[in-house]
């Protein structure tokens, strides 16, 4: 029901304001002694968090001063934070004084009615999982001191579970009754989010009677939203979908009922359970770093820096065969220099396309997504050679250390992933590639790097004979000069096939070029393995052959994407306003 327009004079401190509640906005304008308008503050009704009687304060501590003619409005207030591309959300608060108690009651009633009318997706009841061991082990403190007061203010009830073991959240979501909950909130890092991701998607397929291990089927989206309160060692998903790692910002997105669709990559393995990925699925360097870091968990988050250095010095590359189905290049490109921001037009068009997708396309889908066999559909493209790393990501994978991420132009909800192939190169070249992730330079503008927007990917290792042939060309850690690498592309009925061949440039190799770089490996590791492992959103998959399919908008988060700072005139937040250390 539409709320009637309400307008009156209100006081804030000793200043007089003309307040207007009209449709979707609540605004108040300062009026001087000559009845001239001065500053105006306008707040969308959808971003009003709560309306309370009296003079009330919530953060950092709750306090209430009962007065007959006063009421307090809490709303979202944006500000910038140095070093991030997103906007911090803070709890704005304005205390109004009315000429009469009747007018005060009228304002409170109308504001609360408007919030309900214009925010129909706000959650009423949430299931909250807290990981007390993640990150700096402050999950409990973050939730109870920062998040719970905001939920209480917004009238959201919550059932809180503090996890005691790995996969407890996933098992609960798969087996327990979830009726009555509007969403699930995880207080933790990417590991806790992955548990909830697997639990909700698995639950949705159970209820729909779908075999999720069949790569040819279209998976059923979960009806429950996921909220992420960052409190882990890595919070990549939160950063890539909100733009900042901040518990209050994330909690306010949950409170106002924001909804951000998210693509999910299903990772099928021949003899292992199905896994899901939303950020990074990486083979080679990123798999080795994760495997190495598991040996040094006692170091905390520093283990990733240490392990990255050790793996880089090992200077490994791996033989592999990569097959992929390209996405439509007309819709978007991984090198179009655009960014997926709030209200992204590419993702919006994809939403319309997914909604109108014909259910009768199962036969063609099955031909495209044959399970680990040699059959190729017309769209498949194949490349073979030695790689430093093979990565597939459904989002930018931005983080504070890499503000633009692994693939800066990746989209959250366009039904595609970005496949990044880093061919074997010299150590300095690979270091240049890694360094560019920390700057605004184009990491794809290197001769040994390829990026493709794809719908599905297969990866396998060559047969033993092919592996021996590769080793004759060069040791796993040997550097291949870009001037000596050539590609021979042959077309066939099954699609484009690209075969990596080594060709001599006519000049003889010097003794230095012939010297293998593997002596570095001897300094860091006892033996160079012929294969790597997969890093699936921070979890090790100790296998090589995988089949990956991107499922468009399989999940919805309580988020709205990274907001464009240019559209909001915001000041930089003072560090003193941080609520928790």
Image (spheres, rainbow, N blue to C red):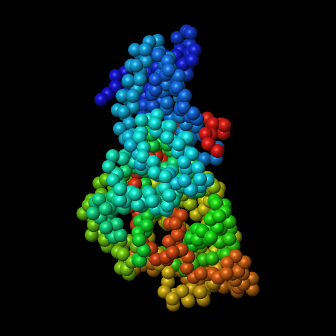
Q: Residue drawn at (68%, 71%), measured in percent from left and top?
A: 310
Left or right: where 292 falls relative to 391: right
As drawn, 431 above or below 64: below
- Depth check, front residue: 260 or 569: 260
As drawn, 193 above or below 283: above
Quarter of the image with the C terminus is top right
Q: Residue drawn at (60%, 77%), measured in percent from left and top?
A: 317
Instruction: Please tell me in which quadrant of the rendered image residue 118 appears.
Output: top left
* Residue 69 location (% of width, % of height): 47, 16
* Residue 279 location (% of width, % of height): 50, 60
Residue lying farthest to the left in this orientation: 360
Left or right: where 84 falls relative to 75: right
Residue lying farthest to the front in this orientation: 164
Q: Residue drawn at (75%, 82%), measured in percent from left and top?
A: 512
Quarter of the image with the N terminus is top left
* Residue 510 location (% of width, % of height): 74, 84
Is residue 67 among what the camera can see?
yes
Is residue 86 among what the camera can see?
no
């Amino acid at each position: 029901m539409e709320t009637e327009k309400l307008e009156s004079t209100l006081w804030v401190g000793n200043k007089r304001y003309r307040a207007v509640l009209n449709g979707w906005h609540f605004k108040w304008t300062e009026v001087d002694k000559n009845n001239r308008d001065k500053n105006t503050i306008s707040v969308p009704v959808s971003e009003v968090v709560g309306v309370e009687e009296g003079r009330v304060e919530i953060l950092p501590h709750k306090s209430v001063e009962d007065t007959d003619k006063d009421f307090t409005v809490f709303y979202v207030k944006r500000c910038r934070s140095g070093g991030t591309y997103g906007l911090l959300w803070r709890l704005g608060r304005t205390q109004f004084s009315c000429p009469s108690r009747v007018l005060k009651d009228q304002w409170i009633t109308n504001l609360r009615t408007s919030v309900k009318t214009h925010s129909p997706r706000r959650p009423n009841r949430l299931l909250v999982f807290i990981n007390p061991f993640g990150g700096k082990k402050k999950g409990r403190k973050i939730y109870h001191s920062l998040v719970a007061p905001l939920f209480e203010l917004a009238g959201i009830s919550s059932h809180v579970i503090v996890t005691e073991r790995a996969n407890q959240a996933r098992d609960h979501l798969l087996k327990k009754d979830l009726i009555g909950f509007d969403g699930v909130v995880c207080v933790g890092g990417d590991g806790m989010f992955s548990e909830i991701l697997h639990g909700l998607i698995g639950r949705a397929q159970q209820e729909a009677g779908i075999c999720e291990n069949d790569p040819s089927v279209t998976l059923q989206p979960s009806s429950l939203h996921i909220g992420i309160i960052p409190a882990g060692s890595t919070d990549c998903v939160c950063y890539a979908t909100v733009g900042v790692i901040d518990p209050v910002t994330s909690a306010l997105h949950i409170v106002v009922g924001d909804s951000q669709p998210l693509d999910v990559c299903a990772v099928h393995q021949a003899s292992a359970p199905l896994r899901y990925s939303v950020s990074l699925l990486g083979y080679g360097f990123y798999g080795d770093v994760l495997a190495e870091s598991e040996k040094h968990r006692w170091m905390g988050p520093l283990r990733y820096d240490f392990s990255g250095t050790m793996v880089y010095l090992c200077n490994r590359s791996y033989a592999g065969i990569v097959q992929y189905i390209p996405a439509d290049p007309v819709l978007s490109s991984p090198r179009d220099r655009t960014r997926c921001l709030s209200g992204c037009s590419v993702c919006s068009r994809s939403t319309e396309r997914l909604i109108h997708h014909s259910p009768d396309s199962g036969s063609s889908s099955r031909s495209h997504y044959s399970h680990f066999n040699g059959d190729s559909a017309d769209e498949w493209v194949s490349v073979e050679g030695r790689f430093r790393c093979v990565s597939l990501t459904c989002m930018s994978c931005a983080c504070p250390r890499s503000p633009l991420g692994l693939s800066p132009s990746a989209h959250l909800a366009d039904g595609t992933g970005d496949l990044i192939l880093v061919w074997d190169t010299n150590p300095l070249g690979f270091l240049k590639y890694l360094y560019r992730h920390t700057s605004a330079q184009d990491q794809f503008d290197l001769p040994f790097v390829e990026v493709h927007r794809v719908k599905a990917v297969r990866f396998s290792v060559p047969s033993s004979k092919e592996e021996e042939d590769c080793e004759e060309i060069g040791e796993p850690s040997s550097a291949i000069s870009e001037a000596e690498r050539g590609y021979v592309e042959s077309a066939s009925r099954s699609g484009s096939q690209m075969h990596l061949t080594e060709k001599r440039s006519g000049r003889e190799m010097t003794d230095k070029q012939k010297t293998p770089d593997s002596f570095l490996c001897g300094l860091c590791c006892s033996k160079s393995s012929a294969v790597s492992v997969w890093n699936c959103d921070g979890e090790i998959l100790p296998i090589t052959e995988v089949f990956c399919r991107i499922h468009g908008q399989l999940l919805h988060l309580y988020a709205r994407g990274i907001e464009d700072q240019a559209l909001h005139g915001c000041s930089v937040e003072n560090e003193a306003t941080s609520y928790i250390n």
